[in-house]
Amino acid sequence: MGKLTALGVKSAKPGRHGDGDGLYLLVKPSGARSWLLRIQQDGKRQDIGLGSVNLQAVPKDGKPQIGDDIPILLRRHLTLTEAREKAGLLAKFAKAGRDPITERDKDRKKTPTFKEAAIAAHEALAPGWATKHAASFLSSLEDHAYAALGELRIDTIEASHIRDMLAPIWTKFPVMARKVRQRTSTVLNFAKAKGWRATEAPGKSVTLGLARHGAGGNFAAMPYADVPAFVADMREKPETAGRVALLLLIYTAARSGEIRATKRKHFDLERKEWNRPPEIMKGKVAHTVTLSDAAVALLEAWFAHRSLKPDNLVFSGASGKMLSDMTMSKVMKDAAMAYTPHGFRSSFRDWAAEKMPTIPDPVAEAALAHAVPDKVIAAYKRTKFLEMRRKLLDSWGEFVSPAENQASCTGDAA
């Protein structure tokens, strides 16, 4: 039982007044009152300020008061009862060998706004991005996201906020809308890794209530629901370097430059991996892509009739040089498709968000070789992170090429 009473706290004269268990009431000549906790830790005495004194009487009706929902360690205006509770918690931390001041202050760190988090994410991640992407990252958010999200605390942003932010540009500027959505997700996932918010960026729920993107305007991505029929049509046509390269691009959600520059030695079909070196990557960082059964079957058939040496390009023109960047685009044009090869990355990303809700967004971003904070990967453990990427691309392969997957399963059973 403490020595002080509520009345005694209010009438105490200037000086230091002990309550017991290291808790003191400090009264200055001016009449200002505050609480102090004195502890002994590692043989050293330490005085810890707890906050000012709250002299207001506690209402007898028992109704919740403003501030009642604030954790006791965060309260800075304390009644005698609250001061005792806070002092008791900090004393327990000290006995457990933890720094009571750190425990008192750790939750006081200011949670940043979306704008502040975006700037921090850009500063941390931009060194690993292509120059063009790094330059446009913040400008696109400034133009389209800051007005709606900029001043919101990063931990309060939900799917509805992002959807409302995207609505004005979703059908008017679909390509930019997709970029803004992806970059917003990058900021939110970075914030999750920093401990500023409890969850990652929302997935499928962001686009609920938004019109479905069509093929008009400058939108160049095929709706993911149409991809299986297109793949089936490609597989029925004569085998050419352009068609096989495009199919591999679809199966792996790769960039066309990565497909055109890859060599035979980059593939390990036994491990079902495509190990891409830095020199063929947009971000100049080595990246391993897991290969689905459909991708492995495609490559096995392509390699079977070609004597490719380790340093040979997998896909080359008649002269043996790298395919033109227009080769795969011509395949699309010949098929009377108003989409671009690069758009299949967006098709994959939309499918992942809407059809694979159990796969975290950072996994889908990693599958696209987008920069993901190392802390995010560590949060899932690296082995599990790779397993989730494999599950994602295996499922994508089954979705876009079910006939190929069925043939692979039948072959295994045989």
Image (tube, grey):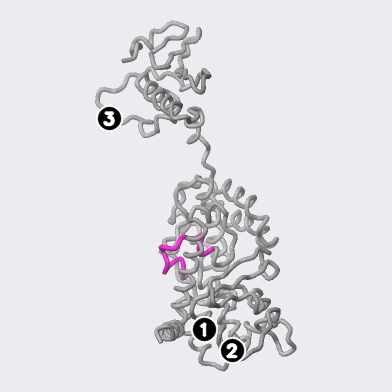
Kindly report which numbered mark, 1 or 2, lies closer to the viewer in this rendering. 2
Which residue is located at x 48 percent, y 36 percent? 107
N-terminal of the two: label 1 or label 2?
Answer: 1
Instruction: Determine which of the numbered discs, if any, sits on residue 108 in the image.
Output: none
Which residue is located at x 26 percent, y 27 percent? 62
Main SS of the magenta part reads helix
- Residue 107 covered by magenta stretch: no
Image x and y of residue 161, in percent:
46, 54
Residue that mark 3 sits on? 63
Amino acid found under the numbered disc labelled 3: Lys
The residue closer to the viewer here, 265 or 318, is: 265
Give residue 68's quadrant in the image: top left
Which residue is located at x 70 percent, y 87 percent? 317
Which residue is located at x 52 percent, y 83 percent? 297
Image x and y of residue 159, in percent:
44, 56
Callout 1: SS: helix
Image x and y of residue 351, in percent:
46, 71
Amino acid found under the numbered disc labelled 1: Ala
Label 1, label 2: how far apart the Cα atoms are? 10 Å
Callout 3: SS: loop
Amino acid found under the numbered disc labelled 2: Ala
N-terminal of the two: label 3 or label 1?
Answer: 3
Instruction: Determine which of the numbered discs, if any, sits on residue 297 in the image.
Output: 1
Residue that mark 2 sits on? 304
Q: Which quarter of the image is occupied by the C terminus?
A: bottom left
| Boundaries of the magenta span | 352-365
